[in-house]
Image (spheres, rainbow, N blue to C red):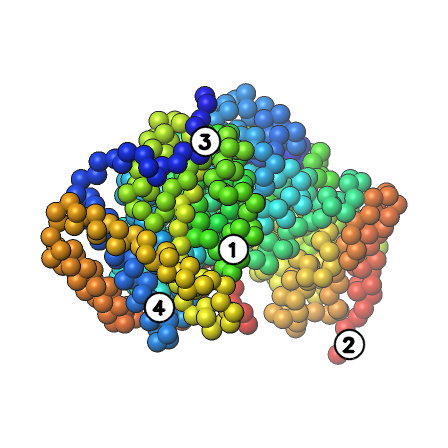
């Protein structure tokens, strides 16, 4: 079978998506944006113990991808995972509670921002280690194939992770075993401070797909509808035993690598002009403009935004009202089958 | 009861669990040809779907195993040789061993890793001769090191059935060791040690192939009128520390025998537990017999020098059995 490598989705005839679905996609992108803006404030206020990697600017990728997936399809994610979680149906309340280290959080306060997981929603984990969610997704895809399920596993990773061995090993295995896995590389142009041009020799990271024998696709990651279309094609192929696809979404993060980056990275590695040039292509504004063009009333869009902001504020209130875990909780959950000598405490 | 070789017992354990549960599959390098002996003939009996030859991608296929386990399968991964776990380390210890805890108990990872060809002494030189279990124990991984065919079968069956990741070391030096293995099915729970020989004067805690060496030493000591008790923890983590403490309570003396490097070894952990929790039982200092803290050399004479042997164990026992506690 000969694959068409490097399909440039942008410029192709767009798929027809019902307006209701587009409105849902808008709502999902807004939830991500508001979540991470408020999360940033929570870090500043000291309500979040640790750091938060904002997804702001990249919303079109998570939402465009997850709009194609069913609840039983799987994703794995990375340190910048809030967008993926929300797009896959994550509860705002339980996410904020996890960020706040509360007992009501997704992981009872043991995982924090970078490790939220919910198997019920097909979220096989965000992951603090760059590139490590990728072979895990290959394993979930393997299990789908093994059990004859018609589901797909999508893994989100960045341009920085694209150079991790784990990603290459997983791509190779997915290709040779024809696994239903979609590799979504969110090329936001920087691996922390390192520009992608200094870490990858080729213009498009998707070129690498050819070396593994899978289709490589480049898509405008600031356009949620384009992402939706590219992923639809890949998911369709994977569901029909056509194997994996590599999709590179060119995108950008408006914030630093994490919220308070400026306190650590004194010398800015991006110009304001560059940041502004991407803000002009803002994925939320683009979808709003399109919906207005289709005749949706501005009032409708405004009320969605208001509802989202209320939901986010309620989520924060839920977090603040929630209890912290008890100290004894620190010794729970490490093992499924426990033992008389466990847990091992640090002093006797 | 039929006698089986150590390697056959491992193979039987894997086969029985595969027969029992469709979700069990095996994966690793060259396993369809059964190159390490464990999966010999398994391809013919279970088919390609459940017997998977991987590319040389230890990190990748360990991670794939983690994902498959999270999704409900029960992968059995074979590492062809001990040190391959260095390549899979991130997925083993930073993912498999931690994800249950990190997710607040949401995910189980029923992943079994069998380290075939563990240990040294085969003239493979430094990069293929480490005993790597102490590192995994340090990071909270469940670790099993069987010393007899009977234990190997029961422990591996349990490891596969366990809902946590477990790493099993197959000490290459005893692959041909023969022992009784009953026909009927049995499981040995993890974290339960076994007294391989009872004694009253000194406790020898040994693991893997050094259990056999210690039993030989115990026989030698009988001639000198010294009664040694040989305790095999079988599982390094969770550790049955009661069996060790109870033995030391009886004998008052402890020698720990471990073919890992000396610093931060499993022997160090056993010694410190007994020093901390069983000090009042001790009539003499605790002794450790371990591998020297240098890489394993190739030349037979050099390699042999560094690895714990009967003569080293004997010398250590003698050095403390001659001590009589004062007061």
| Residue behind mark 1 | A195
| Residue behind mark 3 | A5
Which residue is located at x 31 percent, y 65 percent? A37
Q: Which mark is residue B326?
A: 2
State which chain disc 2 sits on: B
> Of helix, strand and loop, which one carries label 4?
helix
Which of discs 4 and 3 lies nearer the camera? The answer is 3
Judging depth in this view, the residue of A44 and A73 nearest the camera is A44
Circle nearer the N terminus (1, 4): 4
Which residue is located at x 50 percent, y 23 percent? B47
Q: Which mark is residue A40?
A: 4
Cα gap from disc 4 to disc 3, whole angstroms: 39 Å
Give the class, few, some or many, for how many residues have Cα within 10 Å of label 2's Cα (few <14, many ≥20): few
Circle nearer the N terminus (4, 3): 3
Which residue is located at x 60 percent, y 59 percent? B138
Q: Is residue A60 above or below residue B256?
A: above
């Amino acid at each position: 079978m000969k694959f068409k490598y490097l399909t440039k989705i942008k410029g192709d005839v767009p798929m027809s998506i019902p307006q209701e679905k587009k409105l849902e996609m808008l709502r999902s992108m807004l939830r991500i944006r508001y979540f991470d803006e408020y999360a940033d404030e929570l870090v500043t206020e000291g309500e979040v113990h640790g750091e938060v990697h904002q997804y702001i600017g990249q919303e079109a990728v998570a939402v465009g991808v997850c709009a194609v997936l069913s609840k039983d399809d799987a994703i794995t994610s990375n340190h910048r995972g809030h967008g993926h979680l929300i797009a896959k149906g994550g509860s705002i309340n339980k996410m904020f509670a996890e960020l706040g280290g509360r007992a009501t959080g997704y992981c009872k306060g043991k995982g924090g921002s970078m490790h939220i997981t919910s198997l019920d929603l097909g979220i096989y984990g965000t992951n603090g280690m760059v590139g490590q969610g990728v072979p895990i997704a290959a394993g979930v895809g393997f299990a789908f194939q093994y059990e004859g399920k018609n589901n797909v596993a999508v893994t989100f990773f960045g341009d920085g992770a694209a150079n991790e061995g784990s990603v290459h090993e997983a791509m190779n295995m997915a290709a040779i075993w024809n696994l239903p896995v979609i590799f979504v590389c969110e090329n936001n142009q920087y691996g922390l401070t390192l520009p992608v041009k200094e870490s990858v020799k080729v213009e498009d990271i998707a070129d690498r797909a050819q070396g593994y024998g899978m289709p490589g696709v480049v898509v405008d990651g600031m356009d949620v509808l384009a992402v939706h279309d590219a992923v639809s094609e890949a998911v369709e192929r994977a569901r029909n035993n056509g194997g994996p696809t590599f999709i590179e979404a060119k995108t950008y993060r408006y914030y630093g690598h994490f919220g308070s980056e400026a306190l650590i990275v004194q010398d800015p590695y991006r110009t304001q002009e560059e940041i502004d040039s991407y803000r002009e292509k803002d994925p939320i504004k683009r979808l709003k403009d399109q919906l207005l063009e289709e005749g949706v009333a501005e009032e409708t869009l405004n009320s969605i935004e208001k509802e989202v902001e209320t939901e986010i504020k309620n989520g924060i209130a839920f977090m603040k009202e929630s209890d912290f875990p008890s100290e004894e909780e620190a010794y729970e959950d490490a093992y499924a089958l426990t033992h008389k000598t466990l847990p091992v405490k640090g002093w006797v | 009861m039929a006698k089986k070789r150590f390697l056959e017992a491992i193979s039987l354990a894997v086969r029985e669990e595969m027969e029992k549960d469709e979700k069990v599959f095996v994966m690793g390098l060259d396993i369809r040809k059964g190159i390490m002996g464990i999966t010999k003939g398994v391809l013919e009996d279970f088919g390609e779907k459940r017997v998977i030859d991987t590319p040389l991608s230890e990190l990748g296929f360990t991670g794939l195993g983690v994902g498959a386990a999270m999704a409900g399968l029960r992968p059995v991964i074979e590492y062809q040789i001990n040190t391959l776990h260095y390549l899979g380390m991130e997925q083993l210890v930073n993912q498999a061993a931690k994800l249950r805890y990190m997710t607040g108990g949401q995910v189980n990872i029923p992943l079994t890793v069998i380290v075939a060809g563990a240990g040294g002494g085969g003239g493979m030189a430094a990069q293929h001769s480490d005993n790597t279990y102490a590192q995994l124990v340090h990071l909270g991984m469940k670790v099993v090191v069987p010393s007899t065919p009977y234990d190997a079968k029961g422990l591996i069956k349990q490891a596969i059935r366990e809902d946590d990741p477990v790493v099993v070391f197959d000490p290459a030096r005893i692959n041909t060791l023969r022992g009784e293995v009953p026909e009927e099915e049995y499981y040995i729970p993890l974290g339960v040690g076994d007294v391989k020989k009872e004694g009253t004067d000194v406790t020898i805690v040994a693991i893997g192939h050094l259990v056999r060496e210690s039993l030989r030493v115990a026989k030698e000591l009988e001639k000198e009128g010294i009664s040694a008790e040989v305790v095999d923890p079988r599982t390094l983590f969770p550790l049955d520390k009661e069996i060790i403490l109870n033995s030391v309570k009886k004998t008052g003396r402890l020698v720990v025998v471990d073919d890992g490097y000396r610093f931060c070894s499993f022997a160090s952990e056993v010694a410190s537990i007994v020093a901390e929790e069983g000090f009042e039982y001790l009539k003499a200092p605790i002794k450790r017999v371990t591998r020297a803290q240098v890489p394993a050399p190739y030349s037979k004479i050099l390699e042999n020098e560094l690895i714990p042997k009967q003569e080293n164990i004997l010398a250590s026992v003698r050095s403390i059995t001659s001590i009589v506690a004062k007061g």
